[in-house]
């Protein structure tokens, strides 16, 4: 791992639905600053960096840069987006703190899209964005807002408010004013994170949701609200309005009903 140019580089903080990542551009390639990302998951930075140094697929370097809020330029370790995503794939979500799991899921699901949108498409909003790119972002936000308006009578008000805040923040290039625990949680995404293939997700998701809802009601006496959701097969149906605060219920449902059925999935994440 060798340092690159001594010139300090621009660092941009990109907000995800839960947590955030610091990125920079080196030789026209987006890279992730490792230390703040790893520590936001409650993991030991030195341990994870040492692990990366032993991986043939890892591309890690060092560059001088000044993080937002810091008063001076320092030498920081960075990794390519592919390397960072590969690292995330080796982290067992059951070995991170419960409060950090929504951040891990957001990192796994949104990192590549957020970085690509900022550095190449003018998203988030990138000061390099062209007028056409800005028009595209505005048009997409309008379309999403119209969809939310149509869904208003039939979905959970809490879910609708959260989605509306996310759409508004993306359009304005601001940080979403959303409680991380209110970020939507989806059964298919959770099962995918456990390593299930598409056909297994389609087979398991309906009963998974019912069992999770039963556990939640047995624990709280409350029913889960509903929302409209896209399924892996392309159809749209009414589903429970799960959020990140329900993640422990998902984990309990998985452990109780599915872990033994899909034992090969338990080793996919590896040790954190």
Image (cartoon, rainbow, N blue to C red):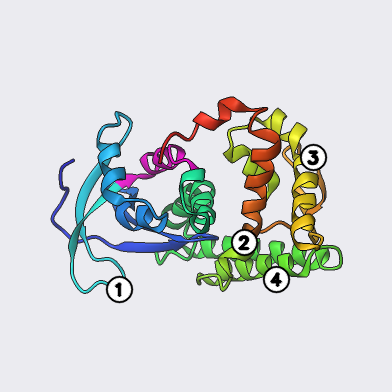
Residue at 48% across, 56% down = 100
Residue at 46% across, 45% down = 95
Q: Secondary structure at mark 2?
A: loop
Residue closest to the far right: 153
Could you say where residue 153 lies in the image, as x and y percent from the top left?
Answer: 86, 67
Whole-angstrom CA distance, mark 3 to mark 4, is: 27 Å
Which sits earlier in the primary sequence, circle 4 or circle 2?
A: 4
Could you say where residue 271 lies in the image, as x and y percent from the top left?
Answer: 41, 37
From which residue to which does the magenta span run?
79-92
Residue beneath disc 1:
69
Q: Are marks 2 and 1 in contact (CB under 8 Å)?
A: no
Which sits earlier in the primary sequence, circle 2 or circle 1?
A: 1
User: In the rendering, which numbered label is found on residue 161?
Assistant: 4
Residue beneath disc 2:
183
Which sits earlier in the primary sequence, circle 3 or circle 1?
A: 1
Residue at 68% across, 34% down = 258
Q: Is residue 113 magenta?
A: no
């Amino acid at each position: 791992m060798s340092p690159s140019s001594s010139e300090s580089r621009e660092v941009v903080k990109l907000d995800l639905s839960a947590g955030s990542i610091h990125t920079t551009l080196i030789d026209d390639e987006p890279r992730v600053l490792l230390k703040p990302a790893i520590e936001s998951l409650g993991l030991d930075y030195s341990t994870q960096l040492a692990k990366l140094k032993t991986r043939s697929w890892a591309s890690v370097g060092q560059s001088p840069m000044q993080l937002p809020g810091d008063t001076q330029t320092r030498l920081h370790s960075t990794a390519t987006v592919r390397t960072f995503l590969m690292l995330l794939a080796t982290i067992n979500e059951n070995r991170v703190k419960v409060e950090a799991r929504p951040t891990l899921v957001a990192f796994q699901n949104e990192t590549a899209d957020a970085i690509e949108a900022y550095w190449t498409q003018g998203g988030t909003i990138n000061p390099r964005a062209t007028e056409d790119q800005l028009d595209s972002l505005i048009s997409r936000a309008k379309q999403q807002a119209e969809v939310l308006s149509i869904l208003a009578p039939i979905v959970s008000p809490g879910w609708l408010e959260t989605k509306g805040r996310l759409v508004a923040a993306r359009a304005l290039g601001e940080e979403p004013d959303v409680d991380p625990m209110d970020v939507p949680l989806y059964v298919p995404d959770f099962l995918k994170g456990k390593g299930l293939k598409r056909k297994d997700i389609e087979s398991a998701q309906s009963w998974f949701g019912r069992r999770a809802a039963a556990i939640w009601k047995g624990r709280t006496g409350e029913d889960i609200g509903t929302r409209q959701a896209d399924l892996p097969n392309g159809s749209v149906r009414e589903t429970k309005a799960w959020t990140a605060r329900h993640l422990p219920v998902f984990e309990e449902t998985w452990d109780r009903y599915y872990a033994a059925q899909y034992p090969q999935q338990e080793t996919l994440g590896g040790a954190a």
